[in-house]
Image (cartoon, helix red, strand yellow):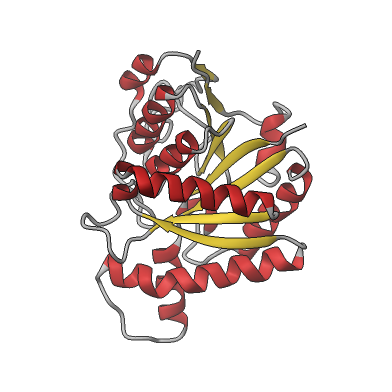
Amino acid sequence: MSKKTLILKIGSSTLTAGSDRISRGKIEDMARQIIELKSQYNIAIVSSGAIATANHFMAVNKWKMTQSRQALSAIGQPILMQIYNEIFRDFGLSSAQCLLTYRDFDNKEAQTNIKNTLSDLFNHGFIPIINENDTIAIDEIVFGDNDKLSAYVANLVCADLLVLASDIDGLFDKNPQKYPDAKLIPEINDIIDCQQYIDENTDNDLGTGGMTSKIQAAEICARNQTEMWIVNGGKKNFILDTMQQMIPHTRFVFE
Protein backbone atom coordinates (compact mmCIF):
# COMPACT_ATOMS: atom_id res chain seq x y z
CA MET A 1 0.00 0.00 0.00
CA SER A 2 1.40 3.40 -0.97
CA LYS A 3 2.02 5.91 1.77
CA LYS A 4 0.04 9.07 2.29
CA THR A 5 1.83 12.42 2.33
CA LEU A 6 1.86 14.69 5.38
CA ILE A 7 3.26 18.23 5.33
CA LEU A 8 4.02 19.52 8.82
CA LYS A 9 4.54 23.25 9.20
CA ILE A 10 6.32 24.36 12.38
CA GLY A 11 6.11 28.04 13.30
CA SER A 12 8.77 29.96 15.18
CA SER A 13 6.66 30.17 18.33
CA THR A 14 6.32 26.38 18.38
CA LEU A 15 9.98 25.77 17.64
CA THR A 16 11.03 28.04 20.49
CA ALA A 17 8.32 26.79 22.88
CA GLY A 18 7.33 30.42 23.43
CA SER A 19 10.81 31.47 24.57
CA ASP A 20 13.69 33.25 22.84
CA ARG A 21 15.63 30.00 22.42
CA ILE A 22 15.27 27.06 20.03
CA SER A 23 13.69 24.17 21.95
CA ARG A 24 15.57 20.93 21.36
CA GLY A 25 12.88 19.22 23.41
CA LYS A 26 10.21 20.25 20.90
CA ILE A 27 12.25 18.89 17.98
CA GLU A 28 12.72 15.64 19.93
CA ASP A 29 8.95 15.53 20.45
CA MET A 30 8.46 15.89 16.69
CA ALA A 31 11.05 13.18 15.98
CA ARG A 32 9.30 10.67 18.25
CA GLN A 33 6.00 11.28 16.49
CA ILE A 34 7.56 11.04 13.03
CA ILE A 35 8.92 7.60 13.94
CA GLU A 36 5.37 6.51 14.77
CA LEU A 37 3.98 7.93 11.52
CA LYS A 38 6.69 6.97 9.02
CA SER A 39 5.16 3.61 8.14
CA GLN A 40 1.97 5.36 6.99
CA TYR A 41 3.16 8.75 5.76
CA ASN A 42 5.84 10.40 3.71
CA ILE A 43 6.56 13.44 5.88
CA ALA A 44 8.06 16.82 4.99
CA ILE A 45 8.59 19.61 7.50
CA VAL A 46 8.20 23.25 6.54
CA SER A 47 10.16 24.89 9.33
CA SER A 48 10.38 28.49 10.34
CA GLY A 49 12.88 29.54 12.97
CA ALA A 50 16.02 30.62 11.07
CA ILE A 51 15.78 34.20 12.34
CA ALA A 52 14.94 33.07 15.89
CA THR A 53 17.94 30.74 15.76
CA ALA A 54 20.22 33.57 14.62
CA ASN A 55 19.01 35.86 17.41
CA HIS A 56 19.57 33.08 19.93
CA PHE A 57 23.13 32.28 18.90
CA MET A 58 24.16 35.88 18.33
CA ALA A 59 23.06 36.74 21.85
CA VAL A 60 24.72 33.68 23.42
CA ASN A 61 28.01 34.20 21.57
CA LYS A 62 27.93 38.01 21.83
CA TRP A 63 28.21 38.33 18.05
CA LYS A 64 27.66 41.75 16.50
CA MET A 65 23.95 42.09 15.85
CA THR A 66 22.42 42.81 12.47
CA GLN A 67 18.93 44.14 11.74
CA SER A 68 18.67 42.64 8.25
CA ARG A 69 16.17 39.78 8.24
CA GLN A 70 17.87 38.28 5.20
CA ALA A 71 21.25 38.37 6.94
CA LEU A 72 19.76 36.90 10.10
CA SER A 73 18.26 34.09 8.05
CA ALA A 74 21.62 33.41 6.40
CA ILE A 75 23.20 33.14 9.86
CA GLY A 76 20.45 31.08 11.46
CA GLN A 77 19.46 28.64 8.70
CA PRO A 78 22.59 26.42 8.77
CA ILE A 79 22.57 26.38 12.58
CA LEU A 80 18.89 25.40 12.60
CA MET A 81 19.56 22.60 10.12
CA GLN A 82 22.46 21.40 12.25
CA ILE A 83 20.11 21.15 15.23
CA TYR A 84 17.56 19.20 13.18
CA ASN A 85 20.22 16.89 11.77
CA GLU A 86 21.74 16.16 15.17
CA ILE A 87 18.45 15.40 16.89
CA PHE A 88 16.91 13.46 14.02
CA ARG A 89 20.08 11.38 13.66
CA ASP A 90 19.82 10.46 17.37
CA PHE A 91 16.37 9.04 16.57
CA GLY A 92 17.54 7.21 13.45
CA LEU A 93 15.93 9.70 11.08
CA SER A 94 17.59 11.14 7.96
CA SER A 95 16.91 14.76 7.03
CA ALA A 96 17.60 16.98 4.02
CA GLN A 97 17.35 20.73 3.45
CA CYS A 98 15.23 22.33 0.72
CA LEU A 99 15.15 26.13 0.29
CA LEU A 100 12.39 27.58 -1.89
CA THR A 101 11.10 30.96 -3.00
CA TYR A 102 7.70 32.20 -4.17
CA ARG A 103 8.99 32.39 -7.75
CA ASP A 104 9.59 28.64 -7.76
CA PHE A 105 5.84 28.08 -7.73
CA ASP A 106 5.33 30.30 -10.77
CA ASN A 107 7.81 28.32 -12.86
CA LYS A 108 6.75 24.99 -14.36
CA GLU A 109 10.28 23.65 -14.59
CA ALA A 110 11.00 24.61 -10.99
CA GLN A 111 7.76 22.96 -9.87
CA THR A 112 8.76 19.74 -11.61
CA ASN A 113 12.20 19.86 -10.02
CA ILE A 114 10.71 20.38 -6.55
CA LYS A 115 8.29 17.47 -6.98
CA ASN A 116 11.01 15.17 -8.30
CA THR A 117 13.40 16.10 -5.50
CA LEU A 118 10.85 15.58 -2.75
CA SER A 119 9.71 12.31 -4.30
CA ASP A 120 13.28 11.02 -4.45
CA LEU A 121 13.90 12.04 -0.84
CA PHE A 122 10.70 10.28 0.27
CA ASN A 123 11.65 7.14 -1.63
CA HIS A 124 15.01 7.03 0.14
CA GLY A 125 13.54 7.59 3.61
CA PHE A 126 14.59 11.21 4.11
CA ILE A 127 12.59 13.89 5.92
CA PRO A 128 12.79 17.04 3.76
CA ILE A 129 13.06 20.18 5.90
CA ILE A 130 11.83 23.12 3.85
CA ASN A 131 12.17 26.84 4.44
CA GLU A 132 11.84 29.97 2.38
CA ASN A 133 15.16 31.09 0.93
CA ASP A 134 14.99 34.45 2.69
CA THR A 135 18.55 35.35 1.65
CA ILE A 136 17.49 35.92 -1.97
CA ALA A 137 13.80 36.73 -1.49
CA ILE A 138 12.78 40.02 -3.13
CA ASP A 139 10.14 40.70 -0.47
CA GLU A 140 11.35 39.81 3.00
CA ILE A 141 9.55 36.86 4.56
CA VAL A 142 6.79 37.00 1.98
CA PHE A 143 5.10 33.75 2.98
CA GLY A 144 3.94 34.81 6.46
CA ASP A 145 6.08 32.59 8.69
CA ASN A 146 5.85 29.84 6.05
CA ASP A 147 2.10 29.24 6.38
CA LYS A 148 1.51 29.97 2.71
CA LEU A 149 4.71 28.24 1.65
CA SER A 150 3.56 25.03 3.34
CA ALA A 151 0.22 25.25 1.51
CA TYR A 152 1.94 25.67 -1.86
CA VAL A 153 4.14 22.67 -1.11
CA ALA A 154 1.15 20.59 0.02
CA ASN A 155 -0.76 21.35 -3.19
CA LEU A 156 2.28 20.77 -5.38
CA VAL A 157 2.91 17.25 -4.06
CA CYS A 158 -0.83 16.48 -3.74
CA ALA A 159 -0.46 15.95 0.00
CA ASP A 160 -3.21 14.21 1.92
CA LEU A 161 -2.84 16.53 4.87
CA LEU A 162 -1.21 19.82 5.89
CA VAL A 163 -0.78 20.41 9.63
CA LEU A 164 -0.03 23.96 10.76
CA ALA A 165 1.51 23.79 14.23
CA SER A 166 1.10 27.13 15.96
CA ASP A 167 0.76 28.58 19.47
CA ILE A 168 -3.04 28.48 19.40
CA ASP A 169 -5.53 25.60 19.50
CA GLY A 170 -7.14 26.54 16.20
CA LEU A 171 -9.51 29.05 14.65
CA PHE A 172 -11.85 30.83 17.07
CA ASP A 173 -15.02 32.80 16.38
CA LYS A 174 -13.20 35.82 17.85
CA ASN A 175 -9.82 36.65 19.31
CA PRO A 176 -9.41 34.41 22.41
CA GLN A 177 -6.73 36.72 23.82
CA LYS A 178 -9.23 39.56 23.96
CA TYR A 179 -12.50 37.73 24.55
CA PRO A 180 -12.72 35.02 27.25
CA ASP A 181 -15.95 33.68 25.72
CA ALA A 182 -14.31 32.98 22.33
CA LYS A 183 -15.25 29.54 20.98
CA LEU A 184 -13.08 27.18 18.97
CA ILE A 185 -14.40 26.28 15.52
CA PRO A 186 -13.72 22.54 15.10
CA GLU A 187 -14.32 22.29 11.35
CA ILE A 188 -14.54 24.57 8.31
CA ASN A 189 -15.89 23.30 4.99
CA ASP A 190 -16.24 26.55 3.04
CA ILE A 191 -13.30 28.97 2.86
CA ILE A 192 -15.70 31.90 2.53
CA ASP A 193 -16.81 31.24 6.11
CA CYS A 194 -13.27 32.01 7.34
CA GLN A 195 -13.15 35.65 6.38
CA GLN A 196 -15.20 36.81 9.36
CA TYR A 197 -12.82 35.06 11.77
CA ILE A 198 -9.48 36.53 10.71
CA ASP A 199 -7.43 37.37 13.76
CA GLU A 200 -6.77 41.07 14.28
CA ASN A 201 -3.67 40.49 16.40
CA THR A 202 -0.41 42.08 15.39
CA ASP A 203 2.41 39.70 14.48
CA ASN A 204 4.50 38.30 17.31
CA ASP A 205 8.20 39.03 17.81
CA LEU A 206 9.54 35.63 16.76
CA GLY A 207 7.68 34.96 13.53
CA THR A 208 5.64 36.74 10.91
CA GLY A 209 2.60 34.49 10.92
CA GLY A 210 -0.85 35.11 12.37
CA MET A 211 -4.36 33.88 11.73
CA THR A 212 -4.51 35.94 8.54
CA SER A 213 -1.67 33.97 6.95
CA LYS A 214 -3.24 30.70 8.11
CA ILE A 215 -6.53 31.60 6.43
CA GLN A 216 -4.56 32.46 3.29
CA ALA A 217 -2.93 29.02 3.52
CA ALA A 218 -6.40 27.47 3.78
CA GLU A 219 -7.49 29.38 0.67
CA ILE A 220 -4.52 27.89 -1.22
CA CYS A 221 -5.34 24.39 0.08
CA ALA A 222 -8.97 24.79 -1.00
CA ARG A 223 -7.87 25.04 -4.64
CA ASN A 224 -6.75 21.38 -4.57
CA GLN A 225 -9.10 20.27 -1.78
CA THR A 226 -6.10 19.60 0.44
CA GLU A 227 -7.15 18.99 4.03
CA MET A 228 -5.52 21.37 6.52
CA TRP A 229 -5.43 21.43 10.31
CA ILE A 230 -4.45 24.16 12.77
CA VAL A 231 -3.14 22.62 15.99
CA ASN A 232 -1.31 23.79 19.10
CA GLY A 233 2.27 22.66 18.55
CA GLY A 234 3.20 23.62 22.09
CA LYS A 235 1.44 20.53 23.38
CA LYS A 236 3.50 17.36 23.69
CA ASN A 237 2.62 14.63 21.17
CA PHE A 238 0.45 17.17 19.32
CA ILE A 239 0.34 15.40 15.94
CA LEU A 240 -0.60 11.94 17.19
CA ASP A 241 -3.03 13.30 19.78
CA THR A 242 -4.76 15.43 17.14
CA MET A 243 -5.11 12.41 14.88
CA GLN A 244 -6.77 10.59 17.78
CA GLN A 245 -9.10 13.56 18.41
CA MET A 246 -7.59 13.94 21.88
CA ILE A 247 -6.81 17.68 21.78
CA PRO A 248 -8.80 20.64 20.36
CA HIS A 249 -7.94 21.83 16.86
CA THR A 250 -9.53 23.18 13.68
CA ARG A 251 -9.87 21.09 10.54
CA PHE A 252 -10.37 22.60 7.09
CA VAL A 253 -12.00 19.89 5.01
CA PHE A 254 -12.87 20.84 1.43
CA GLU A 255 -15.03 18.71 -0.87
Find residue 139 and report its horizontal and vertical position in percent: 22, 54
Tell me which residue sits at (35%, 56%) in the image: 205
The image shows residue 245, relative to residue 138, as above or below, that is above
User: Would you say residue 63 is visible in this rendering?
Assistant: yes
Tell me which residue sits at (52%, 62%) in the image: 97
* Left or right, residue 108 beside residue 184: left
Closest to the observer: 95 or 118?
A: 118
Find residue 175 and report its horizontal and vertical position in percent: 38, 30
Closest to the observer: 220 or 110?
A: 110
Q: Quadrant of the N terminus?
A: top right
Find residue 117 and report its horizontal and vertical position in percent: 53, 53
The image shows residue 14, relative to residue 182, as above or below, that is below
Tell me which residue sits at (42%, 13%) in the image: 190
User: Would you say residue 45 is visible in this rendering?
Assistant: no
Find residue 13 and report its horizontal and vertical position in percent: 47, 52
Residue situated furthest left in the rendering: 138
Closest to the observer: 223 or 51?
A: 223
**Can you tell which quarter of the image residue 25 is in?**
bottom right
Tell me which residue sits at (56%, 44%) in the image: 8
**Can you tell which quarter of the image residue 214 is in?**
top left
* Left or right, residue 145 beside residue 200: right
* Left or right, residue 150 beside residue 3: left
The image shows residue 229, relative to residue 109, as above or below, that is above
